Amino acid sequence: MPEGYSEKVMDHFRNPHNVGEMKDPDGIGHVGNPVCGDIMEMYIKVKDNVITDAKFKTFGCGAAIATSSMMTDLVKGKTLEEALKVSNRAVVEALEGLPPRKLHCSVLAEDALKGAINDYLLKTTGKGLPDWKPHEESEGH
Amino acid sequence: MKRIYLDYAATTPTHPEVVAAMQPYFSEKFGNPSSLHAFGQEARSAVEQAREQVAKLINARPEEIVFTSSGTEANNFVLHGISFANKDKGNHIITSQIEHHAILEPCHFLEKQGFNATYLPVDKYGLVNPKDVEKALTDKTILVSIMHANNEIGTIQPIEEISEIIREKTYFHTDAVQTVGSIPVDVNKLGVDLLSLSGHKLYGPKGVGALYIKKGTRMESFIKGGGQERNRRASTENVPGIVGLGKAAELARKELNSRQKHLTELRDKLIKGVKNKIPEVVLNGHPELRLPKNVNLSVKYVEGESMLLNLDLEGVAASTGSACSSGSTEPSHVLKAIGLAPDLAQGSIRFSLGRLTTEDDINYVLDVFVKIVDKLRKMSPIYKGGA
């Protein structure tokens, strides 16, 4: 397997699920920057506290694309509280693992989702996630 | 599925004639070249024939060729051997920021041993300015090492001009691993004292390389033991490998002109094709002073590894200078040194062509590459065109 990616990762890389922009999203999460690395945008639709749809756009390596795809799959149909509990580790497990040096890519997917939920909460309640801030993309940049 | 190999700068398939030449030296003519009996002597004469073949390719004398286990070993040998043999003269080494790690890492090691190293910058095409070499020279300089052509971006350095400046002042080495067998390499024209080459980059086997050491060069041996290679490099000779390198050198000399012409045509077709079909693509490296086999492109809004993996899924083997490793996506030291913008450095892809590459291959690659870039751009949050 290239770069030691699992078959599941390559499946999601080859045919990513839920890719593309969303019309009138209820929340948008934007993380990363082009100087430090990958960039991810996640869009969610929320109805009665449930994520009814999730989509993404990613500029990044194979792992970044596969984790975005898996993350959107995992959170669809979940309540916001349930979705917030989907950790980067859960995404990695669902992908049947990632090479160690690619693990940081999964953090980006978690951040993008939290960013989208935070954005939704800010818009609807005026209060975002209490302790949310994106991980440092990379120290020293 | 169709499989197209466009990573010849990483390694080349061993030429069938090379494999055939090596074959008898495993089980039949297996003697140790240091043995005085007939078994030893037939191996000895094979090694000496290979030395002549390699010497001829680079216009050196056979006795100036030392066989090594690789290009990396040849480079380590130079840094180690020159530095430790000339400590009494000085402790300063000049090299460039875009050298292969096989030069940079030994330099870092030597810095810890009390030597000083100057890493010269390059311009946006990856060229070292000979004037910078002149400025960096001190009376403590014992070695200048500048690669003949860069493995990533293919830029060919003005080695002759640099040697004019250095002449007689200090030892001058060039890492010619990417050029020997690709373009004409003549140690006298280049004016170098030392030159590294590698077997598997020119359709020879892996595990063998050579170092040209100009007669009279003061150098410490790197591998110590028996008296092989005129006391320059101990260890029983890798006879099959050396025979293979010799044959590969002979073939390279015969085919050099046709290989150059063939590759230049295909290279330019690929570059032109991509530029015509895909907007916002940059050619990295020099437009003319460039290895005939090298195409290095940066595709805006798209990341290198994702292009590489998609190409691999279509059967095309390429390489990228952006390696997403722990923490962040770090572009290669070469792309950084030419000052490429971070997003472009992340979107780099290298195709390196070889003697078996055909025009059909290039057409196929163009076809799939356009589709891959389109697909990836559509999913890129920083791409605002199209879609």
Image (cartoon, grey):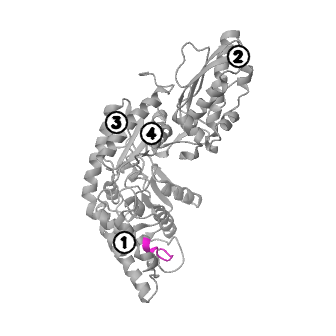
- Judged by depth in the image, the label closer to the viewer, 1 or 2, is 1
Residues marked 3 and 4, same chain = yes
Q: Position of residue B210 (x, y in %)?
A: 41, 67
Amino acid type, mark 3: Val
Residue at 37%, 78% in the rendered image? B46
Q: CA distance from mark 1 to mark 4?
A: 38 Å
Vertical arrangement, residue B130 with respect to residue A97, above or below: below
Give the residue at mark 4: B348
Amino acid type, mark 2: Gly
Give the residue at mark 3: B274
State the extent of the magenta-drawn residues as a range.
B233-240
Crowding around mark 1 (Cα neighbors within 10 Å: few <14, some 14 to 19, many 20+) is some
Q: Nearer the viewer, residue B368 or B125?
A: B368
Q: Which mark is residue A128?
A: 2
Q: CA distance from mark 3 to mark 1?
A: 40 Å
Q: Which mark is residue B21?
A: 1
Q: CA distance from mark 2 to mark 3?
A: 46 Å
Amino acid type, mark 4: Ser
For mark 2, give the secondary structure: loop
For mark 3, give the secondary structure: helix
**Chain ID at mark 3:** B
